[in-house]
Amino acid sequence: MGTWDKAAAEALKVLGKDAKIPDPPKAVVKAMSDFEKAHATFEKARDEIEASILDLQNHNSAVIHALEQNKSKLQKEDFGLKDGDQDKIKKAQDLLTGALDHIIEGWNDGNKGLDELDEHIILLGK
């Protein structure tokens, strides 16, 4: 209770050395002690949540990279058709890679949400 201690020392200077500043009531001391314990529990939980969010971010990014790689492979895929079927192949590639673009966009949005959540969690209690 640094603020209280400082104020009590200043008050004692004003009152003189024979004066006695009362100690804080036991209820205040207990409440502050209980708060410190609860705060320590909260800090531990926040640290665990931060680690979990980082793990999610890393796995989310891994999914995005795997989807991007699959998209690149599909751009070369011939689907077992002959060279004369290039129009069909191109159309199928466009459909599938377009779907992957949409899926990847969703995963990127998820990453943005995790980034925002991470920032808020880090700032809690600071």
Image (cartoon, helix red, strand yellow):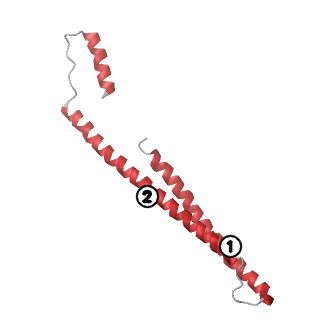
Label 2 Cα crowd, 10 Å radius (few <14 / some 14-19 / many 20+): few
Q: Quadrant of residue 19?
A: top left
**Cα distance in 3D space between marks 2 and 1:** 30 Å
Residue receiving disc 1: 72
Query: Of marks 2 and 1, which one's residue comes earlier in the chain?
Result: 2
Mark in the foreground, 2 or 1? 1
Q: Quadrant of residue 36?
A: top left
Q: Secondary structure at mark 2?
A: helix
Query: Front-most of 32 and 45?
Result: 45
Q: Is residue 118 left or right of residue 20?
A: right
* Residue 99 placement (x, y as % from top left): 65, 75
Q: Quadrant of residue 71?
A: bottom right
* Residue 112 placement (x, y as % from top left): 57, 57
Q: Is residue 44 above or below residue 74?
A: above
* Residue 2 placement (x, y as % from top left): 32, 26
Q: Are marks 2 and 1 in contact (CB under 8 Å)?
A: no
Q: Is residue 68 above or below residue 1?
A: below
* Type of amino acid at the residue the image marks with label 1: Ser
For the C terminus, the image quarter is top left
The residue depicted at 57 percent of the width and 65 percent of the height is: 107
So how many labels did they put on this image? 2
* Residue 77 placement (x, y as % from top left): 70, 81
Query: Front-most of 104 and 63?
Result: 63
Query: Front-most of 103 and 68?
Result: 68
The residue depicted at 20 percent of the width and 30 percent of the height is: 25
Give the numbered dot on residue 52: 2
* Type of amino acid at the residue the image marks with label 2: Ser
Q: Residue furthest right?
A: 84
